[in-house]
Amino acid sequence: MSAQKHIEITLPASKSIVNRLLIIEALSGQKIVENKDISCDDTEVLLQALHFDNQTINAKFSGAAMRFLTAFFAQKEGEWILTGEKSLLLRPVNELVEALKILGADIQYLENEGFLPLKIVGKKLHSKTLKIENSQSSQTISALMLIAPMLHNGLTIKIKNVSSFPYILLTKKIMENCGAKIKIVRKRKFCLCPTIIANPCHCGSLPAMTGYIKVFPKKYFPKKFPIEADWSAAAFWYACAAMFDTKPIILKGLLPDSYQPDSVVKNIFENFGITSSWHTNLTDTHRLILEKNRCKSVLSASSVFKYSFKNCPDLVPALAVTCCANNVKFIFSGVKNLKIKESDRLAALVCELRNCGFMLKNSSDFIFWNGEKCVQQNPIKIETYNDHRIAMAFAILSQKIGLEIINRSVVEKSYRNFWQDFCKIAKK
């Protein structure tokens, strides 16, 4: 590994935060996001789309742009064709479209029912009470919430069995920071899931969210504020710290009291002996220092790591690769929505880790490894399936197992400087 005293990484701005702010910026007509925060393809796609009128818009590979733009264009006067690249055309959007139609939206499927491309004729929408159960994506609800302050009487959404609920709370926080008024009433039980993790509340096994969301008709009055770095991107550096005896890794721009759901990664990796400590320099820039302490690890080859990723599914690729590299058996639940991400991530992990010699299995809402191994592919070539998180997870593993990653450029979807940063830690 690198011989320097520490490894310093400047993470990209959180695309979850930036995407939501770009919609608020377009709705309010006030500038919020700085150019420096447009740091990945996903945010650039959304920014460009919001500045075009009456045209065909290509959301490329971005599920967030697909959902946020569908809701945004539905309430904006004009006519649009919303499409995307091949993999995005396979990701369902029917849940959001049907909800918008209840509000009076004029949306047509141009090819396959429930999928892009869409024809959207924007018009004034009506305030209604919506019911959304077993949501395919929390972004459906976030998309509706973001446009709700523009409706005459706001919007009420009754929800049942909604996964990734912390992303809805993130949307609420961002909207409130920009002047909106939201009320959320939740009904849930406490987690009683048995686990080998020291602190049971870290198991992540919270039931899907049930309750209602009320967005009041209070228009946005946004103001500029610093945008936090991306905790989802930080996961790959936690994985690196867990796999190797690296020098301390410094991650810039993350906050200890973050609302980003993937900030739970700092708790998860405590099980691998990774400590997280914050330091603030003279310019008030938050610096998170990752260090490995083997004595604090509670995982071994004889243990089984159990965790529900219902509220943070994007962390699964980094954690699955980390467990295999450390010979830690695992059972991950709450992962069914990974089948409709940029790729079928469950199938991708099973296939590509098999090429690396690890025999994973998956079924419905689970992916697990019982320690079974097989002969590695020779040479090992990792297919990324146009999925940035698959590419980054296996990049870290490449430092332990010699492998080649096909289509390395897919990381630009969320982390343009990943390979540049990776060179700071890669074997020379």
Image (cartoon, rainbow, N blue to C red):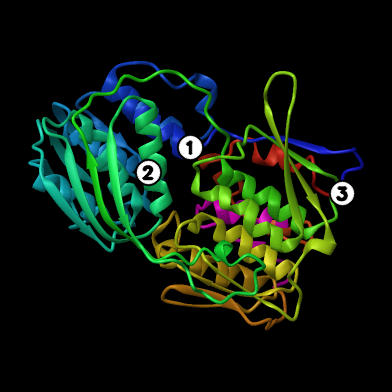
Q: CA distance from mark 1 to mark 3?
A: 30 Å
Q: Which of the 4 quarters of the picture holds residue 171?
A: top left
Q: Which residue was labeled with disc 2?
A: 64
Q: Amino acid at mark 1?
A: Lys
At x 25% / y 56%, what residue is drawn? 159
Q: Amino acid at mark 2?
A: Ala
Q: CA distance from mark 2 to mark 1?
A: 9 Å
User: Element type at marker 2?
Assistant: helix
Q: Is residue 46 visible?
A: no
**Along the line of sight, the residue nearer the viewer: 270 or 16:** 270
User: Element type at marker 1?
Assistant: helix
Q: Which residue was labeled with disc 3?
A: 1
Q: Please state if 54 lies on the left or on the right of 220 as rendered.
A: left
Q: Which residue was labeled with disc 1?
A: 15
Which residues lie in the magenta part?
377-396
Q: CA distance from mark 2 to mark 3?
A: 36 Å
> Magenta includes 384?
yes
Kindly indicate whether the residue at mark 1 contacts the one at mark 2 (C-beta within 8 angstroms). yes
**Along the line of sight, the residue nearer the viewer: 309 or 377:** 309
Q: Position of residue 224 (x, y in %)?
A: 45, 18
Q: Which of the 4 quarters of the picture holds residue 230?
A: top right
Kindly indicate whether the residue at mark 3 contacts the one at mark 2 (C-beta within 8 angstroms). no
At x 73% / y 67%, what residue is drawn? 325
User: Element type at marker 3?
Assistant: loop
The residue carrying pointer 1 sits among few (fewer than 14), some (14 to 19) or many (20 or more) residues within 10 Å by Cα, namely many
At x 60% / y 44%, what residue is drawn? 233
**183 over 398 or under it: above or below:** above
Q: Amino acid at mark 3?
A: Met
